Amino acid sequence: MRTLSDAFGRRINYLRISVTDRCNLRCAYCMPAEGVQWQPREELLSLGEIVQVVRAAAQLGVSRIRLTGGEPLVRPDVARLIAAISHIDGIQDIGLTTNGLLLEKLAPALADAGLSRVNISLDTLDQKAFRRLTRLGEFGQVWRGIAAAERAGLAPIKLNTVVIRGINDAELLDLARLSLDHPWHIRFIELMPIGNTGDWGAGFLSARDRYVSVQEMRQTLAPLDLLPAEAPAGNGPARTFRIPGAAGAVGFISPLGEHFCETCNRLRLTADGRLRPCLIQTGEVPVREALRGGQDVTTLIEQAAARKPEGHRLWQRDIAISHNRMMCQIGG
Ligand code: SAM
Ligand code: SF4
């Protein structure tokens, strides 16, 4: 079988697919309150087109897929898409990153379709802070979605928490303690200067003051005596710990402070059909026109891998960060 590697010898076996740019929330760090201009539907890849890209990627040794968005569960054919991908030779693992709002309704169908597990974004346990941050969401609906995912066997459940000073930095101990009784993986993520980087409006600190480093998060969690732990399957760049005796785990993802570019194993496919070599930097390779022209996209996937930069260099302040897309248009 052919394999896919980049110019720095990194093996690429993971494809993150943004299946839609639409979303039913307006999280302050991801998009402006008024939302973003959705792309016309005909510009988004169809189910069949996404499946063709995954089939070509699988022939190059890609075995892990993650569906993201926007919010992937607002795409009406998402369960059918998962079923189609799960039948592709070589695909061993399909994950999905969601805000959880629609999981209560959809978790059983997603599990039946072949979804392996879910990452659910949950930044706060406080209903008011949840509404302020997501602008539209109801905390209880996400909480019921987590329970539904667990009942459907979409395990291990991972909760993604972006830490934001003035919003949830006082809740880190409570959030981490969820792992005591639940076999969940609570992953604390540094806020990235990508997406909605400007003023978030009343009730939020300025852009300069909102960021909390992983080092500071660890200090806050020091009373829990976290012990290094083995990372669960598909844990990607998270550094994993455990509260002694806990059922679940606590992880830290530090794209800025302790970046993980040297182990990067992924490509991204945007909803409008462009392969993105790096979360932050540009250099996208378009595949939609090739798909619609009946061409094989294998060489385009190889081209995208070859364009992967050594690192995103987000930790250097002097680089031009790609602002051509909001986070909801890349998928995180
Ligand atoms: N709608 C889904 C969700 O919220 O989980 C999937 C798409 S969302 C863009 C994917 C992940 O990116 C979420 O966990 C979200 O918290 C994270 N994210 C969005 N903007 C971010 C930012 N500026 N910094 C760090 N993480 C961010
Ligand atoms: Fe939507 Fe996810 Fe962005 Fe929130 S983080 S606005 S749920 S895409």
Image (cartoon, rainbow, N blue to C red):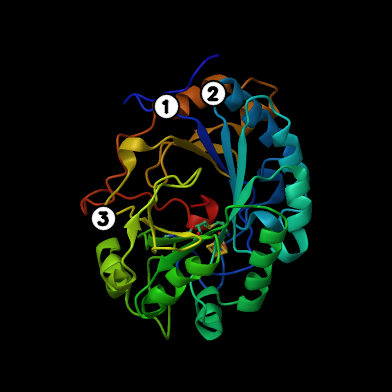
Q: What residue type is labelled 2?
A: Gly
For disc 1, the neighbor class at 10 Å (few under 14, some 14 to 19, many from 20) is some
Instruction: Where is residue 19? Give x, y as percent.
Output: 64, 47
Q: Which amino acid does label 3 sit on?
A: Gly
Q: Which amino acid does label 1 sit on?
A: Arg
Identify the residue position indicated by label 1 in the image.
Answer: 11
- In the image, 182 versus 112, the foreground residue is 182
Lower position in the chain sequence, tag 1 or tag 2: 1
Task: Give the side of residue 65 with respect to residue 47, left or right.
Answer: left
The answer to whether residue 138 is seen in the rendering is: no
Q: Distance between the residues labelled 2 and 3?
A: 31 Å
The answer to whether residue 313 is seen in the rendering is: yes
Instruction: Where is residue 239? Give x, y as percent.
Output: 36, 51
Instruction: Where is residue 103? Give x, y as percent.
Output: 70, 62
Residue found 42% across the figure and 46% down from its top? 279
Residue found 38% across the figure and 37% down from its top? 264
Identify the residue position indicated by label 2 in the image.
Answer: 61
Residue found 38% across the figure and 32% down from its top? 308
For disc 3, the neighbor class at 10 Å (few under 14, some 14 to 19, many from 20) is few
Instruction: Where is residue 177? Give x, y as percent.
Output: 45, 71
- In the image, 199 versus 165, the foreground residue is 165
**Do the numbered discs 1 and 2 sit on residues whose CB atoms are within 8 Å?**
yes
